[in-house]
Amino acid sequence: MTIRYKRPDAKDALSLVQAAKRQMDFTLTMDPSDDSAFTIVRNIYECFRMIGDALLVKKGIESDDHLAPINELLKLKVDTLRPIFLIDNLRRLMHNVNYYGYSPKKAEADDAISIAKSCFKQLHEAVMKEIEKH
Amino acid sequence: MAKKKMKGVKLLELNEAYQKVLQWFFSRPTEKIGLTDLSEALRIAKTTARSVVAKLAEEGFLTIEPIGKLLRISFVHNHPYNFTWKISYNLSLVFSSDVLNEVHKIIPSPKTIILFGSYRKGDDIETSDLDIAVEVIGNEEPKIIEMGLLENFGYRKNVPVHLYVFSRNNVDINLFANIANGIVLEGFLEARP
């Protein structure tokens, strides 16, 4: 994991969070199927990664892998319906997709949607609060 | 200066020997062995073996039974090391073996991989199976896959590996409770209150 330091950028962080929210809202309108599973799982995972990345950007940290943003997100204290640590399972799933050619199924898309519905809103709000802090 | 170096070397050797003896008895808990056979099996000097065995006997981990001029050494099954150090030893063997890669060949994208059963509890013996549970997404019926034999597993040979594939929507509560009390090797096991 390589971490580079730059100027903290709240505006950039806010843009990331807003883009993630838009993308998540759209993704949750998609019908899960074996064909759409890849897009759904990837989009949901990317949205979580983006809001984790926003926390790093706000702190002036640039990471070149997916571990740091997800770990940053998992540090947040939020009350969710399902454990936020499941986001790391999504990261592992996407790793299998990207590096080993695994093809996600409808059941995996259903689970990703359930994780998104159980955790994204609370995490989004918590990240927004962090960004708005001076 | 030279004396100091020698001391360090001796200490390291003793520590290595201590680990070897511990691990040998972790791997062969039902066997009784003589000092000569033990030192040959572990490739350590007999004098070193004697001092390590004496130390472990003093700690209550081994019992030494004199038979004429010989010593018969055996292992105390309810000693705390079996529930502490042995579990970490088993875990290190699982991680250093190729088991997880083999699991991935059978289940390409497991949600969680868990070590459970006797190897997790530390009460495994020579004939115990290595039980690994794999959580998959969906409603799959639980199934047991015999993965084959692990040729070398510490000082143990030909350990059978069983894979319990389950989905949380279709699992017996007792099996799930057993699995949930295992050690997560990979992924995150969701447990609901």
Image (cartoon, coloured by chain):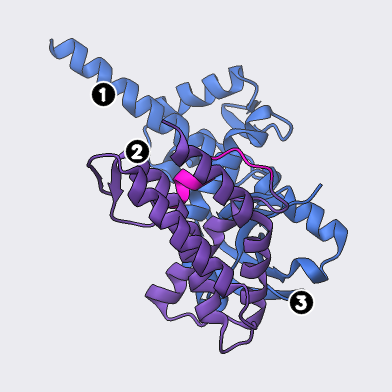
- State which mark lies toward you, 1 or 2: 2
**Going from the N terminus, do you reach mark 3 or mark 1 first?**
1
Q: Is residue A104 left or right of residue A58?
A: right
Residue corresponding to mark 3:
B139
Q: Quadrant of residue B1?
A: top left
- Please report the residue visible at 40 percent of the width from the left and 27 percent of the height from the top: B15
Can the viewer see residue B180 in this picture? yes
Whole-percent x, y for residue B2 in the image: 13, 13
Can the viewer see residue A93 in this picture? no
Label of residue A9 in the image: none
Q: Do the residues labelled 3 and 1 touch (CB within 8 Å)?
A: no
Residue type, numbered disc 3: Asn
Label of residue A59 in the image: 2
**Do marks 3 and 2 both belong to one polypeptide chain?**
no
Tell me the CA gap for discs 1 and 2. 48 Å
Residue range highlighted in magenta: A68-79
